[in-house]
Amino acid sequence: MPFQPQGQPPAGAPPAFPPGPPPMPPQGQWGQPPPGFAGPPPVTAGSLIERTFKIWWANVGKLVGISLVMMVPALIAVGVVAGAAFGLSMGRAGGQPDPSQVFGMVGGIFAVALVVILPLTMIMLGGVNYGVIQWLAGRPAGVGDMLRQGARRLWGLLLTGLLVFLAIMGGYVLLIVPGIMIATAAAVAIPATTVEGGGAVQSFQRSLELTRGYRWPLFGAFLAVMAINLLMGLMGGLLGLIPILGILLNLAISLVTATIPYVLPAVAYHDLRVAKEGVDTSQLAQVFE
């Protein structure tokens, strides 16, 4: 028998070991996780809270920036209406406020809230939803881009927000518990409008569908975020007792922590679609292109 090198099978014999694994597919095909995270995230209260704070902390500067951009025009509008109404009431009553003018001032502020503050708030929420999806896809967005995308969906966001508000208030009129249940079930209606561009009824139904089976984790996550915000507010209130510096610190803490609840609905919408529908993060981000 001719000599065979040690460890080498005879000629024509099958290989001694099974072939190696097949080559990996190119990036972007099957088996490749989205760039924003590795694998589908679990939808639990703990995971939602953890991911919300992670995304919030990574984008806190942008979130505060978009809040300030939206807040300044609203404050100016309210200040102008309140100042004009108060000055008019003082002038007509010989230095004493006229009750009828005071009511007019309150009505003017309410009108400004509807005409100015509400649209600005919807633009901000839509922009935050866009920013969260883009960040999860590994493509962080700037404040200007976030505002443009929020304004792009303004009409749909207004109608969806109004429908959700009326539904929640209807639940609270019946009892507090139904209102909480409706608020939890409709928690991702605004992100659904931002991403999918549907109407108010369609977005509301999408939220009911996506949250079904996950409402307890959602309720726990929202409750925890509210509790953390309340705790931070109490700490800021204590700092506010310190003259000047404490007041400034209180305002800064309030402005920063107020942005945390904006992130949670977008994270919940993303994670629910990934878990229930197997949607890739990049697919969600591509709808804005």
Image: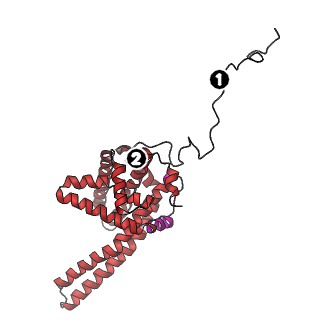
In the rendered image, the residue lying farthest to the right is 2
Q: Which residues are magenta?
A: 134-151
Residue 155 position, x and y percent, is 39, 69
Give the mark nearest the N terminus, 1 or 2: 1
**Quarter of the image containing the N terminus?**
top right
Q: Are marks 1 and 2 in contact (CB under 8 Å)?
A: no
Tag 2: amino acid: Glu
Q: Position of residue 18 (x, y in %)?
A: 65, 23
Regarding mark 2 in the picture, which secondary structure is present there?
helix
> Alpha-carbon distance for marks 1 and 2?
43 Å
Decide if residue 275 is in sight here: yes
Query: Does residue 273 lie above or below 168 as drawn?
Result: above
Residue 108, magenta (yes or no): no
Is label 1 or label 2 in front?
1
* Residue 165 at x, y percent in the picture: 28, 63
Under tag 1, what secondary structure? loop
Q: Return the mark for residue 50.
A: 2
Answer whether residue 67 is visible to the viewer in this image. no
Which disc is residue 18 wearing? Answer: 1
Residue at x 49% of width, y 54% of height: 284
Residue 59 as seen in the image, left or right of residue 234: right
Q: Residues within 10 Å of mark 2 (few under 14, many from 20)?
A: some
**Magenta segment: does it hold 142?**
yes
Circle 1 residues within 10 Å: few <14, some 14–19, many ≥20: few
Q: Which image quadrant for residue 56? A: bottom left
Residue 6: quadrant of the picture: top right
Which residue shows up at 46% across the image and 56% down it? 132
Displayed quadrant of residue 105: bottom left
Given the current orientation, which residue lies at the most extreme top position? 1
**Front in this rendered view, residue 268 or 65:** 268
Q: Position of residue 250 (x, y in %)?
A: 33, 63
Q: Nearer the viewer, residue 14 or 121?
A: 14
